[in-house]
Image: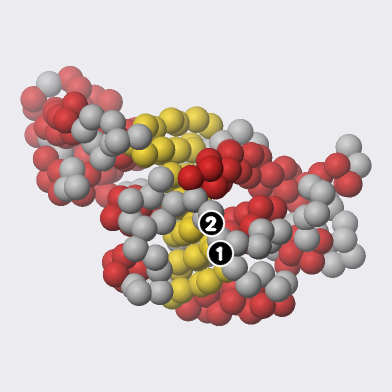
Amino acid sequence: MSEKHDIRPGQSIELLKELHILTRDGQLNQDSRRKLKQVNHLYQFIEPLLQEVLQERSAIRLVDHGAGKSYLGFILYDLFFKTRSDESRIYGIETRDELVQKSRELSARLNFPGMSFYNLSVAEATESVSLPETVDVVTALHACDTATDDAIAFGLKKKAQFLVLVPCCQAEVATALRRTKAAALARGPLAEIWRHSLHTREFGSHLTNVLRCLQLQAHGYQVSVTELVGWEHSMKNELIIARFKDLPRRHPAERLRELLGTLGLEELEGRFLTPE
């Protein structure tokens, strides 16, 4: 496949160079071609959601949590937002100030005026007057440990129409499983699922995402889970898309509470059984 087929029409060559997808002389090697395909594949999931927002609103308010170098935000802006003449805006939220400064400088160089970057924690972002009271889309791409949970909490607080999450490592549930393992083994054979350390980590990761889905459903969201096909280089290949439908809340909340009780993880109710 020739390189021109890997780059989407209108895609900024300068941006792709800044993101190190293209070399300085504009070439694609095998690794960067794979990265570009991965980015474009993720965009295919998000673009229809942006179109849905525009069926109801004249502009889009998208918040990217744990933005890092704002890789995702820049690609979304380049492919969808930059040609719009409305008030659509992408907000990048990141706790490392040096990355925030670099993103601000890059957006200025590329003349991407509809991007804003803030050095804020999730709690600070939730209360910040720099962000709108409600948002349309919340994204979190490979946000580590509890950062995905923080993005969910932000999205719920801001009444987001969509949440698009690619979770990364999360140690909190695995740590709780490890701490209660002896008691769980004494109760019955279910704890054999996570008896061994490797299984504790893997089961904890899987369980975390199950709990996240139930949490979103308990707030009226319709949730779909799929593989983020194309991210072959990453073990973290799960894509969670939540769409607010104002669905019944009671049953998923009960299932969440029952699941935590069955596994002896009642201590995590405060994390996942969040109030409306």
Amino acid type of the residue tagged 1 in the rendering? Glu
Secondary structure at badge 2 equals: loop
Residue 124 occupies which quadrant of the picture? Answer: bottom left
Tell me if 246 is positioned left or right of 54 in this view: left
In the rendered view of the protein, which quadrant contains the N terminus?
top right
Q: Residue at x 55, y 79 (%)?
A: 101
Tell me if 187 is positioned left or right of 126 in this view: left
Q: Which mark is residue 28?
A: none
Q: Is residue 118 above or below residue 165?
A: below
**Residues at marks 1 and 2, CA–CA distance in whole angstroms:** 5 Å
Q: Position of residue 112 (x, y in %)?
A: 66, 69
Examine the rendering and report whether any part of residue 227 can be seen: yes
Residue 254 occupies which quadrant of the picture? Answer: top left
Secondary structure at badge 1 equals: loop
Colouring used for the render: secondary structure
Examine the rendering and report whether any part of residue 208 can be seen: no
Q: Are marks 1 and 2 in contact (CB under 8 Å)?
A: yes
Q: Residue at x 61, y 33 (%)?
A: 229
**First-in-chain label (1 vs 2):** 2
Amino acid type of the residue tagged 2 in the rendering? Ala
Give the residue pinned by disc 2: 59
Q: Residue at x 79, y 66 (%)?
A: 14
Give the residue pinned by disc 1: 87
Say few, some or many: other residues with alpha carbon within 10 Å of mark 1 (under 14 / 14 to 19 / 20 or more): few
Say few, some or many: other residues with alpha carbon within 10 Å of mark 2 (under 14 / 14 to 19 / 20 or more): some
Nearest to the observer: residue 11 or residue 55: 55
Q: Position of residue 187 (x, y in %)?
A: 8, 25
Nearest to the observer: residue 200 or residue 38: 38
